[in-house]
Amino acid sequence: MNTSFYTRITQGKAAKSFREGNKTFVLNHPEHMDELTKIAFSIADKNHHKAFWALELICEEDCSPFEYYIDPFCKLLSSYIKDHTKRPVSRICMFLAKSKKVTLTKNQEQLIIENCFDWLIKDEKVAVKVYAMKALHALSKTNKWAIPDLKQIISTDYPNQSAAYKASTRDILKKIK
């Protein structure tokens, strides 16, 4: 691993400027994409979430640079257990589900759907749940069977959730009626 690149990623802060700086650096130096994903996928590395901060911003802009890494990403989804990792991971799932440039395989879709439903039914932070429901909604266009379960889960949770969750739930329910 390139020590200076690793240091750049791991010394970053949560501030948007640091995350944006790493995203821009990797997009301008695509040879570092492989190393960025290795850091992110190294669950034992206490800083792997910082690599996901850059990956989430890359995928927000364009999922294409991440396309080669989608399969290993999906296979590791259930391995991400820390809150500070689940948020960017759930956002990446949403961006992949909504992407017009990247086509997910059926297996990748199933892994994302399975993990998003898990996040919805577990005691997760609101942001993770919101991104999960948005990913599920996007994937329900080709996986119609997911709609009844999505409706039921988000409707049942609605009264006990935050304003942000409720707003997203209302928006999703309007779209799937």
Image: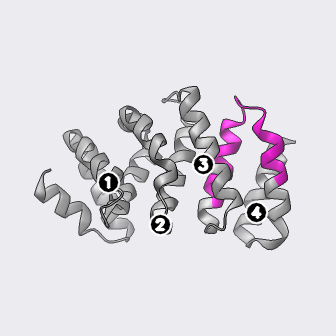
Callout 2–callout 4 Cβ contact below 8 Å: no
Give the amino acid at mark 4.
Ala
User: Could you tell me how far apart the alpha carbons at marks 2 and 4 are, in whole angstroms?
Assistant: 25 Å
Q: Residues within 10 Å of mark 1 (few under 14, many from 20)?
A: some
User: Could you tell me how far apart the alpha carbons at marks 3 and 1 are, in whole angstroms?
Assistant: 19 Å
Q: Residues within 10 Å of mark 3 (few under 14, many from 20)?
A: some
Dot 1: what SS?
loop
Pick the residue in front: 74 or 131.
74
Give me the residue at 60% from left, 48% from top: 115
Nearest to N terminus: mark 4 or mark 3: 3
Give me the residue at 76% from left, 39% from top: 146
Dot 3: what SS?
helix
Q: Nearer the viewer, mark 1 or mark 4?
A: 1
User: Could you tell me how far apart the alpha carbons at marks 1 and 4 are, in whole angstroms?
Assistant: 34 Å
Callout 2–callout 1 Cβ contact below 8 Å: no
On screen, residue 88 versus residue 160, left or right, reads left
Q: Which mark is residue 78?
A: none
Dot 4: what SS?
helix
Q: Could you tell me which quadrant the C terminus lies in? A: top right
Q: Is residue 123 magenta?
A: no
Q: Which mark is residue 115?
A: 3
Give the amino acid at mark 1.
Ser
Q: Which residue is mark 4?
A: 167
Give the amino acid at mark 2.
Lys
Q: Which residue is mark 2?
A: 82
Q: Which mark is residue 42?
A: 1
User: Could you tell me how far apart the alpha carbons at marks 4 and 3 are, in whole angstroms?
Assistant: 22 Å
